Amino acid sequence: MKITFRATMLTVLLTLITLTVAGLGYSSYRNARFAAKDLSIQILQQTSRKIDQQLHTALIIANSQGELNRLLLESGQYQVKEFPRLARYWLEVMRSSPRFTRISLGMEATGDWYYVRRVPSGKLAIGTLLRNPQTDKLELNDYWPEDFPNKPFFTNPDQSDEDPRLRPWYITARKAGKQTWAESYVFFGVHGVADVPGASCVTPVHRPDGSLVGVLTSSFGLYELCDFLATLNIGQDGFAFIVETRADGSRRVIGLPKRDLLLRTVSVPGKPPISELVPTEELADPLVRACLQKVPDVDDKPDIPPPATVVPQLMRFTHDGVHYLGSYSKLTYPDAPNWLICIVLPEADVLGKVEEHNRETLLIGLGFFVLALLASWLISGQVARNLEYVAKETKAIGQWRIDARPVAHSLIVEVDDLGVALEETKTGLRSFQKYVPSDLVRRIRASGQEATLGGELREVTIFFSDIADFTSISEQLSPEVLVEHLGEYLSAGSEQIVRTRGTVDKYIGDAIMAFWGAPEPNPEHALAACTAALQTQEVLKELRQKWEQSGKPLFHARIGLHTGVAVVGNIGSDARLNYTLIGDAVNLASRLEGLNKYYGTSILISESTYQEAKTTVVARPVDWICVKGKTQTVLVYELLGLKGAVSRETEDLVELHGQALARYRAQDWAGAEQLFEKVLALQTDDGPAQQMLARCRHFQVQPPAAGWDGTWHMDAK
């Protein structure tokens, strides 16, 4: 069933009125609670998404850099023994990626450790922890880049307690056997002192036999994460923090707006004090501890993929008599560590922003008006989508893109009729397109003017083809069969012309006239014409196999090509125009097509065409010709194929025939005769060689007149 556009608009109005009246009758006493809940969910979701995106960027950079470093080492492009070269590369990476705090490599065999580190001031340092062969202790040296490797600014001859193989991050990578994330820890810093907490993407490096070479780290500091969390505006007093669940089930807060709460100092007997992440239960912020008590254990099951989008889990809790909204969500990055994004938001931050009761009715009315507007939009979409389609297709017609498409039917009668009429118009234009070259129509359309008489001189390559013995073949067939058979040939030939950006000028019975270089310029028009001629003969060869099986007569085409200047344009009268070309170049191309019969060839091209395309085609000179009605001599070539696509035998034939033709023009009849006989030995039915051999024998008996320059004057077309 189809309805009118007027009925559609009436439905929209009735829907708007009904929904608006119904919305105004809705009780407003629940509005505050509803609005608060909705707003809080939006705040929590948007904040979680923003944090997830920030972490996603940091994690993917670290993962990618770790994988790249592994590939560089395992492929041998960088080697540990060339650490100065590797260090320069890591320095450039650190400079271009300010998120990185450290890139390092720990060695499995010796416990050696190489790293590039960003100190708290932001300056970069290079460090090595190498085993001293004399003391068998790990010796630490820190350098500024400009002093590496000659002048360390800090040295410790015994830093064996920092053997990377004993560090949790190294053990994690060794156990995993693949790239993973280590649990957050306090980095070993410059001067041999731990400084900032960080997270490390650890990547094991293996030999071809699978044995472990060492472990790479790509790390970033958690203080930058804390600074980012401090910039978030979550209500008036809300905030977000990041929690890491460790392998033993314990948790550590690794990101807080107040970063000075992350670490604590622990005294170790006999050693300097060290810094470590504060256990959750000892965290100085009681609100964070209260929130975490409401967050259940979230298992990081590897067989369950992470969500495609942030899906925060909501909760409510009370602390010190204040009601809070909270959420927690996992990271969406597939290779992310086991971290949770947690957000705390006082309910008062949202409820306090709700409008007073006297505005609630208006807000509800506006809300339902939006619903009414949405309903009308969905209904009117039946009109809009089809009108957009009609507009798009109309624009395409203006650009002469008139391919057939399914009719876009609509429930609206008028719109449906418009779509049907549009497709009928395109059908008529497609029929018209078969009479007029598409490029010409697009050019006329772009000019915005009506086609008028006129032309211009343009260098083009002209194509003439004709079917051998077509008259005798046509006498064997009925008109209907002949038209169908000829149409199959003309379609195949025209397709190759259009495919190479040529313009089919006209069909003259069984002949095709075409040209390249107009109406649209083509600097390689000669090559395009040669390609079309060769492809036409190949397609015709396939068609002959098909016709032979079906018992149809076989067509053999002769093609002539000539490149020259002709008058191209709208030729005719004010009543009817034909976009074509005229001039001597056209006549010569037609004569070349006819010469194929005399020489027993399939494709003949003029010297001008050969000169334009000689770098990409294979052709042999055939003869110096003066066609009937002309006085100018033209060197004619037989087009044999494209370079790289012809056989070695064909190349030998071209070379041998060229040598024979040179002897012929030098009037060395005996030498030319011997070479032409060699050509016939390669190809017994070679028409040009047979013709020239006969001339050589004739001239030995009856030499040409004095002043003969090799030109052969044709008496027939």
Image: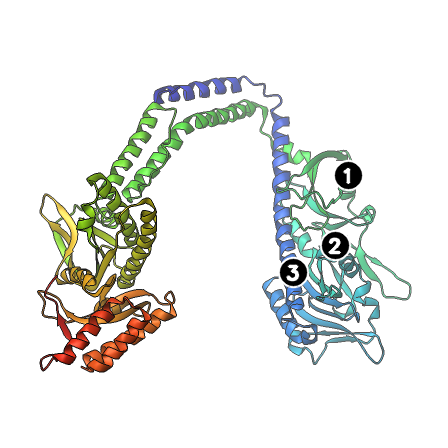
Horizontal relation, residue 483 to residue 192: left or right: left
Tell me if label 2 and label 1 are in contact, CB under 8 Å. no
> What residue does disc 1 label?
296
Residue 76 is drawn in which quadrant? bottom right
Look at the numbered disc 1 and give the secondary structure of its residue. Answer: loop
Q: Position of 82 compared to 193: left or right?
A: left
Front-most of 468 and 238?
468
Crowding at dot 3, Cα within 10 Å, few <14 / some 14-19 / many 20+, comes out as many
Task: Tell me the residue that label 2 is attached to.
Answer: 260
Real-space CA distance between mark 2 and mark 3, rounded to the nearest whole angstrom:
33 Å
Q: Which three-letter amino acid code belongs to the residue tagged 1? A: Pro
60 left or right of 584 in image: right
Along the line of sight, which residue is nearer the eye, 35 or 246?
Answer: 246
Instruction: Locate residue 309, reporting x and y percent.
Output: 61, 42
Q: Which residue is mark 3?
A: 67
Q: Can residue 199 be seen from the camera position used here? A: no
**Outermost residue to the right:** 269
Residue pictured at 81% horizontal, 67% vertical: 162
Q: Amino acid at mark 2?
A: Asp
The answer to which quarter of the image holds residue 344 is top right
Residue plotted at (25% across, 68% down): 610
* Position in image of residue 219 (x %, y %): 69, 60
Q: Earlier in the sequence, mark 1 or mark 3?
A: 3
Name the element at disc 3.
Answer: helix
Residue 422 rendering spot, x and y as whole percentages: 30, 33
Which corner quadrant holds the C terminus? bottom left
* Numbered marks: total: 3
Q: Nearer the viewer, mark 2 or mark 1?
A: 1
Kindly report the distance in space between the C-alpha atoms of the residues bearing marks 2 and 1. Answer: 26 Å
Does 286 appear above or below 158? Answer: above
What's under tag 3, amino acid-wise?
Glu
